[in-house]
Image (spheres, rainbow, N blue to C red):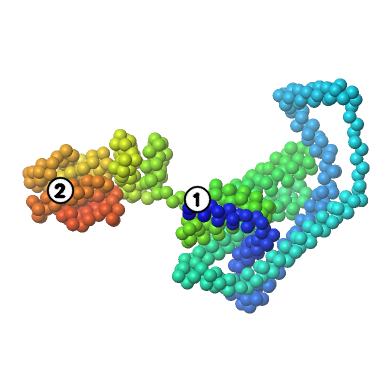
Amino acid sequence: MAPLIRLATVMLTVAMLWAGRDFFIPLALAALFAFLLKPVVSFFNHRLHFARTLAVITVTVLSFSVMGALLWVLGGELHQLVKELPGYRHTIHQRVISVREVGQGGVFEKLQSLAMEISNASDAEDVKRNGAAPETPVLIERSTNRLQETAMSALGFLADSLGTAAVVVVFVIFMLLRQNDVRNRVIHLVGYSRLTTTTRALDEAASRVSRYLLMQGLINGAYGLLLAAGFWAIGLPYVVLWGALAALFRFVPYIGPWIAAILPVALSLAVFDGWTQPLMVIALIAGLELLTNMVLEPLLYGQSAGVSDLALLIAIVFWTLIWGPVGLLLATPLTVCLVVFSKYIPELKFIEILMGDQPEVQPSFLVYQRLLVGDVEEAEELTHASSKEIGHGNTLDQVLLPAAVHARREMLAGRLSKEESDGILETLTTLACETVLDEVPPVSEGTGPLLLCRSFDTSADSIALHWLTRTVGVGLWRWESIPQSALVSEVIAQVESLKPAIVCISAMPPGVSSTAQLLCKRLRHRFPEQKILLARWGASKAEIRTDTGATWVVTTTEEARERLVSVLPLGEPEVQPS
């Protein structure tokens, strides 16, 4: 029932956003500008010691005045471009002829000839069937009415735009003036029991969106200036228009810059006779895009918006369908806010999982999942990447051993057959040998204290035991193993005969807990002074018991290494894991 209620809530919210877009779009635009201007207002208020109200009004008026002037210039250039387009008709015609000449005699020309023959044959059949060619209707154009309709439409659009702009400016001023009041009302609405969560969510959303918009504004402005300067050097007209459009469309991730590049490239093909200048335009756009992505964005921004690439593309499509071109520009900040709030609201946790840039799946589960479907290559890549990032020992403790524990748990739960489990454990052992153990030099036969090992699962426990033999006092320990089939009495007899310094009982969870504890208690009862190391590789805290009779209980190879090193004679060298 709960999933149906959640789905109905989402559908109702989408319907409200679409039906109330005339109200929500100005509000969202105002919030966007408020986030963008907030750092500037703070600078005027705290650094230049302007009063809060004066700082808000000054920044808002200056910002929207600059935007209005820029729109006026862009409108003039766009109007001039529309007037001069017919003058480029000859160049466009020559360009089409040159492209058509390239395809002469090829497949394209043959297909065109075939289409013309079919079209002529169809027209002839229509003439025969009707007895005469159909008369072409005479269209009487009412140019006066059309001009009047066009003028009225333009005036209506201008009035709506100016009205929306006025509402947005008023909203921005009041949002900047009353931001503390709005924050306090939100906290009071949510409740003081969630004061910590609400405060963190509001602060993270505000800081992340403000930083994103400010840095993207600086980057896009620099991109637009460089692009306009390059177009001016090439000789392309209307450089202010193309630079502004490029800066604006770069707020749309991934696809925006290439959408903005279509018009200047098309104009270069119409303006210039040859191919040199159009190719220079394309090269300039591609080079600036690479420079921005690889140098400017990492230098000035340095962090992602917190949303995965695929989720951001889906969000762009969604907001564009709901709110049109405005939704295209607002998609990223709106999605960032949604992901931030979902991190702090348990009911919206699924949004963070689906849209966040950090995957929730742990590397150990990813390795197990890849091995489950037989993708050994990707499992090996994940293991290599983990070894480079966190080191070989941590990879063993945090990736390979937990993956082996999960395979055993699934096998005991009946969701995995014994053969499948053994195959996964065998592959994990191979991965450990190839990615971890190969980085450590092999051990030589030791002459020091004896370490006697009793393993309950040779295939699983061997991963950790091989690592220990290569990282703890190379040549200082003598390692001997008791067969897995040995009974408790046989283990006691071996301990009594060999008198080891330490008895290591390796028992990877789940299962074998009671048997391992029984062996520990029997050894403790028979040899009160014997040092016993119980290794529960990859076990959680809930699976660890302290009343086992063991001297030490460890869950990682790092803990086991520390315990074994502490028993070595003072001054003896040891090998640190890489």
Q: Measuring 42% from the left and 39% from the top, which residue is drawn there? A: 378
Q: Measuring 68% from the left and 73% from the top, which residue is drawn there? A: 57
- Above or below, comparing residue 245 to residue 98 in the picture: below
Tell me the distance, in whole angstroms, between the alpha carbons under discs 1 and 2: 47 Å
Q: In front: 298, or 53? A: 53
Q: Circle 2 sits in a helix, a strand or a loop, which is it?
A: helix
Is the residue marked by circle 1 packed among few (<14), some (14-19), or many (20+) residues within 10 Å?
some
Whether residue 567 appears in this view of the structure is: no
Q: Which mark is residue 519?
A: 2
Q: Circle 1 sits in a helix, a strand or a loop, which is it?
A: helix
- Rendering quarter of residue 456: top left
Q: Position of residue 343 (x, y in %)?
A: 48, 59
Q: Earlier in the sequence, mark 1 or mark 2?
A: 1
Q: Measuring 85% from the left and 43% from the top, which residue is drawn there? A: 87
Is the residue marked by circle 2 packed among few (<14), some (14-19), or many (20+) residues within 10 Å?
many
Q: In front: 269, or 428? A: 428
Q: Measuring 72% from the left and 41% from the top, which residue is drawn there? A: 278
Three-letter code for the amino acid on which mark 1 is drawn: Leu
Q: In front: 244, or 459? A: 459
Task: Kindly identify which residue carries mark 1.
Answer: 354
Three-letter code for the amino acid on which mark 2 is drawn: Leu
Horizontally, is 483 left or right of 428 in the view?
left
Horizontally, is 129 left or right of 321 in the view?
right
